[in-house]
Image (cartoon, rainbow, N blue to C red):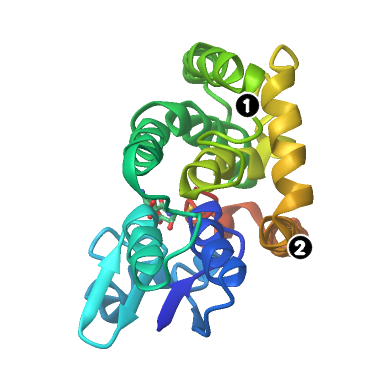
Amino acid sequence: MIIYGDYGSSSTRRVLTVLRHLKVEFELRVVNLSAGEQKKPEYLTLNPNGAVPAMVDGSMILFEASAIMLYIAAQYPSSLLPDGRAYFDTIKWMFWAAEHFRRGHTDLIEERFIKRAHQLEEDDRISAHAEASIHRYAAVLNEHLSNRRFVVGDSPTLADIDLAAPLSHLRRTRAPYDKYPHVASWHNRLLSEMPAWRETGELLEQRLSEMEARHSKVPAGERRVELARQAG
Ligand SMILES: N[C@@H](CCC(=O)N[C@@H](CS)C(=O)NCC(=O)O)C(=O)O
């Protein structure tokens, strides 16, 4: 199995976490987002959106991190994708993560990380809208986690990974989480009980710090190419 991605991408992180957790052998081909490699014609044949990750496994080609995670989980059955009712609960929270929970975070990444790297002004109206969305859905997640160890049952599933992904960028987005203690406890639990989540977080942080250090040396006019919406 070949994964195309960048360690600095939280969507790539979701897939790498599943593979590492299940100890599945894979090859990572780095698509360097700083260099805009996700827009190269040869990569666009794998993911026409010009975004990471993508997967090739024999004749199977997939984009969308959640689809790749589900594909891997189907090949290697485990508690990450439980059976029966818990299966549908897992899928429900994965859809909810994509449709609702992650959206405000994506906007804040654009406003407070990507734009800053391009020396562009943050649009306060977009950030305020994003924060309102984060509050709306973080309150739902916080309540759900008030009496649960993980999102579905007592051990992590793909849903926990999909929901935790945007927290990868909290240091940069300054997303408003002070009021959501159950979300914070759950994320700490995930970090301590799922080593693969912790390890991919360290790799992501290291990669983003490298990118930031490099960008600070690049003249402002050239930064647009350097940082092409890489955080996700
Ligand atoms: N919904 C997609 C999101 C993919 C995405 O936006 N990836 C970001 C990195 S996390 C990316 O490649 N951005 C580069 C770009 O859009 O140019 C997924 O889950 O795979």
Q: Is mark 2 within 8 Å of ligand 1?
A: no
Q: Position of residue 23 (x, y in %)?
A: 59, 77
Q: Residues within 10 Å of mark 1 (few under 14, many from 20)?
A: some
State the residue at coordinates (70%, 37%).
187
Q: Residue at x 47, y 16 (%)?
A: 133
Q: Nearer the viewer, residue 229 or 151?
A: 151
Could you say where residue 11 lies in the image, as x and y percent from the top left? 48, 54
Q: Which three-letter amino acid code belongs to the residue tagged 1? A: Arg
**Label 2: which residue?**
206
| On screen, residue 187 above or below 28 | above
Depth check: give the residue in front, 208 or 138. 138
Reading the image, the residue beneath label 1 is 148
Residue drawn 34% across and 66% down?
74
- The amino acid pointed to by label 2 is Gln
For the question of whether residue 168 can be seen, the reply is: yes
The numbered mark, 2 or 1, whose residue comes first in the sequence reads 1
Q: Residue at x 39, y 57 (%)?
A: 65
Is residue 46 at least partly visible in the picture? no
The quarter holding residue 87 reads: top left
How would you rate the neighbour count of disc 2 (Cα within 10 Å): few for under 14, some for 14-19, many for 20 or more?
A: some
Quarter of image, res 223? bottom right
